[in-house]
Image (cartoon, rainbow, N blue to C red):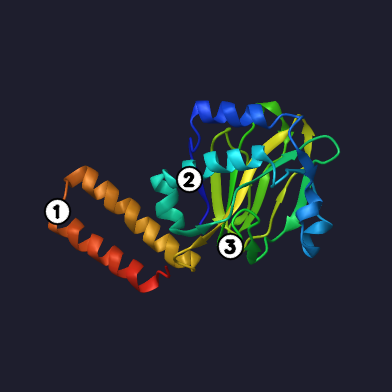
Amino acid sequence: MLLHLKNLLSKDELASVQAQLGEDAPWRDGRSSAGGQALAQKNNQQLAQESDVARQLQTVVLAAVRRDPLFFSAALPRKIFNPLFNRYGGDANHYGDHIDGAVLHSHADGQWVRSDISCTLFLADPDSYDGGELVVVDSFGPQRIKLPAGDAVIYPATRVHRVEPVTRGARLASFFWIESMVRSDEQRRLLFDMDMNLLRLRAQHGETAETTALTGTYHNLLRMWANT
């Protein structure tokens, strides 16, 4: 499931994050954290994970996703990898086709996280740079994604994806992975669709015997499929 999450960061949060991700931030060669497959494809800058700036911004991003009900409904998170931050521009301007590693080790808390879902949170105004689209190869073909600053996209980590070359300006983003309580993307999609339709039914008709019964079905399916 590919899902656009709007206004994940407030305007004040976004302004604060952008102010801390200027050219003088502790950027490093992004290839320093790449695995064998990605090493030949990755050409960007990444914020030093051990820096105070990275730790402060990780707190902001984690607070944003944890308060977003749509994110919770779609991802059903069990673990969230500590958010990372990257910059594309100048000579370090693209990331070729790759698939994210299946199991990742977090430097922040020492956890191992299975990457069921990938998330990219866009942090630069799309009018401030050219190129830089996130291209996710979906079952319906390549999906080209370039969102307003403060918006995010989640998609299955099993998908081949890339970041197109940035030819003007700088593309800033946070990226991280989610280990879901429900491992199957197909099962998560069914639960999400049921949850969203239950919300619509309640908005139209209030709480009824039917919505109560369907809610029970949702939770019974979640109980069957979830691993906590």
The mark that comes first in sequence, 3 or 1, is 3
Mark sitting on residue 75: none
Residue at image location 27% in from the left, 53% down from the top? 198
Three-letter amino acid code at disc 2? Val
The residue mark sitting in front, 1 or 2, is 2
Above-or-below relation of 180 to 16: below
Residue bearing mark 1: 208
Q: Residue 163: horizontal and vertical position, in percent?
A: 72, 47
Of mark 1 and mark 2, the one earlier in the sequence is: 2
Residue for badge 2: 65
Q: Quadrant of residue 34?
A: bottom right
Regarding mark 2 in the picture, which secondary structure is present there? helix
Residue 159 spot, x, y in % from top left: 63, 60
Q: Amino acid at mark 3?
A: Gln
Furthest toward the bottom, the residue is 224
Residue at position x 58%, y 43% from top? 58
Circle 2 residues within 10 Å: few <14, some 14–19, many ≥20: some
Q: Three-letter amino acid code at disc 1?
A: Thr
For the residues labelled 1 and 2, say whether their Cβ atoms are less than 8 Å apart. Answer: no
Q: Give the percent coordinates (x, y) of residue 42.
A: 79, 52
Return the residue at label 3. Answer: 111
Point out residue 152 in the picture as x, y percentages from the top left corner: 55, 42
Please, is residue 212 above or below residue 223 in the view? above
